[in-house]
Amino acid sequence: MPPRIRSATALDLEAMAAMKDAAWRETYPGLVPDAVLAGLDARRPRVVERWGRELRDGASYWVAVDEGGIVGVTHACVAPEPPRGVPLELAMLYLLERVKGTGLGQALLHTAIGDADAHLWVLEGNRRAIAFYTRNGFIPDGAAKDVPGMPGGVREIRMVRCAEPDEA
């Protein structure tokens, strides 16, 4: 049975966070310090608490579920400091390795933001994700930053999809 996408509920939060951690462990070796990956389980309660608070405040999260459980998660929101003219942020999109390349990432992206103008932050060096977002009309806008709370100079680049170019 192919995965189905549905809105997440508070009952999904722990499984969502565990799936995100598994996706990080599969995707980020060599991109983030090993100590960060080793410490994901300890951070999970804070992630679950934050996502729960956001859900109670009206945020929307979506999960992709198959017979084995949650295999993907996505969330979009209005960014507190958006690039000019593009307030919608794809805040996260994670998939387990076993469902990458199946079209599920595309379906989650469409569920979260459709064809809207949006921006996102992606780890510098995450070539697969950068290629995926490029195929979906996102381009790097030159902004980069250190990932907050991440040791070792791990950086993210911002990518933007905008129908109308920004006029400075």
Image: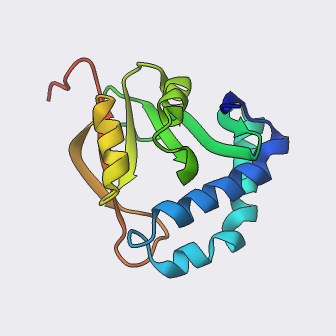
Of residue 127 and residue 116, the one placed in the foreground of this image is 127
The way the protein has been coloured in the rendering is rainbow
Q: Residue at x 71, y 49 (%)?
A: 16
Vertical position of residue 167 compared to residue 122: above or below: above
Q: Residue at x 25, y 49 (%)?
A: 143
Drawn side of residue 115 relative to residue 105, left or right: left
Vertical position of residue 151 compared to residue 134: above or below: below
Vertical position of residue 121 compared to residue 61: above or below: below
Of residue 70 and residue 9, the one placed in the foreground of this image is 70
Of residue 31 and residue 157, the one placed in the foreground of this image is 31
Of residue 79 and residue 42, the one placed in the foreground of this image is 42
Q: Is residue 148 visible?
A: yes
- Residue 20, image x and y in percent? 62, 55
Quadrant in the rendering for residue 124? bottom left
Q: Residue at x 40, y 41 (%)?
A: 120
| Residue sitting farthest toward the front | 1
Q: Is residue 83 visible?
A: no
- Residue 55, image x and y in percent? 73, 38
Quadrant in the rendering for residue 8? top right
| Residue sitting farthest toward the right | 11
- Quadrant location of the N terminus? top right
| Residue sitting farthest toward the bottom | 35
- Residue 103, image x and y in percent? 49, 32
Quadrant in the rendering for residue 160? top left
- Quadrant location of the C terminus? top left
- Residue 151, image x and y in percent? 44, 77
Q: Residue at x 65, y 45 (%)?
A: 71
